[in-house]
Image (cartoon, rainbow, N blue to C red):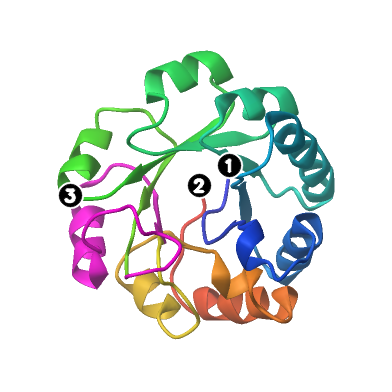
Amino acid sequence: MFDLSLYLVTDRALSLGRNIEWISEEAVKGGVTMVQLREKDCTTREFIELAIRLKHKLNPFNVPLIINDRADVALASDADGLHIGQSDITYSTARRLLGSDKIIGLSVENIEQAKEANELDVDYIGLSPVFVSPTKTNTGRPFGLDGIKHVMAITKHPAVAIGGINCINATAIIQAGANGIAVVSAICSANNPREAALELENRIRRCNTNVY
């Protein structure tokens, strides 16, 4: 059982020099329901140690910790799950390594990939990107609201939308059918991550959301 409604993806470069654990804990106190730890520039040991510390912070709130890309880090830190992209480790390999009790999410960048994901028993899909975003520069054409509606009409999986999402457009994304929103700079770069999360959570709560 997990809740995709407000999904934080960490980004050290956008955190204004602040501690990832602190930002994540504050965001959870404001309403974040899942946290994905994304690290591109640290060593494997540093990544694992950070994941272990962050999991310790999140456990009291029963908020799952998802590791971006790195199955080895997810295993070593006993994280709650793994998020993979189209060019990362395959779903079948990830599932074999992590076992049946871990959450595995898959990014899809177009309608065809969303259809292909129906053949997989992933726990959720990430629609990436929904809008143009400086944190999602290596992806295809944005889905937009119409793309979300199209995917939600054909997918068998719960879906979280990411890319260019903020308080202005969050409600429209949920109304288009997404089960949740994933944000990076809207929380990581906010002066007050807890208040930023709370504002997003308030907007989501007004819409009909599903918990999985």
Extreme residue in the bottom direction:
168
- The quadrant the N terminus occupies is top right
Numbered label attached to residue 1: 1
Please name the residue that numbered disc 3 is placed on: 111
Spatial separation of the CA atoms under disc 1 and disc 2: 5 Å
Q: Residue at x 38, y 24 (%)?
A: 90
Amino acid carrying label 3: it is: Ile
In the structure shown, which secondary structural element does the residue marked by tag 2 occupy? loop
Q: Is residue 118 above or below residue 160?
A: above
From mark 3 to mark 1, how far is it between C-alphas? 26 Å
Whether residue 143 is in magenta: the answer is yes
Q: Which residue is mark 2?
A: 212
Please, is residue 171 above or below residue 133 in the view? below
- Nearest the viewer among 37 and 122 is 37
Contact between marks 1 and 2 (CB within 8 A): the answer is: yes
What crowding class fits label 3: few (fewer than 14 Cα within 10 Å), some (14-19), or many (20 or more)? some
Instruction: Tell me which segment is drawn in magenta.
Output: 132-161
The percent coordinates of residue 16 (x first, y second) are 70, 71
> Circle 3 sits in a helix, a strand or a loop, which is it?
helix
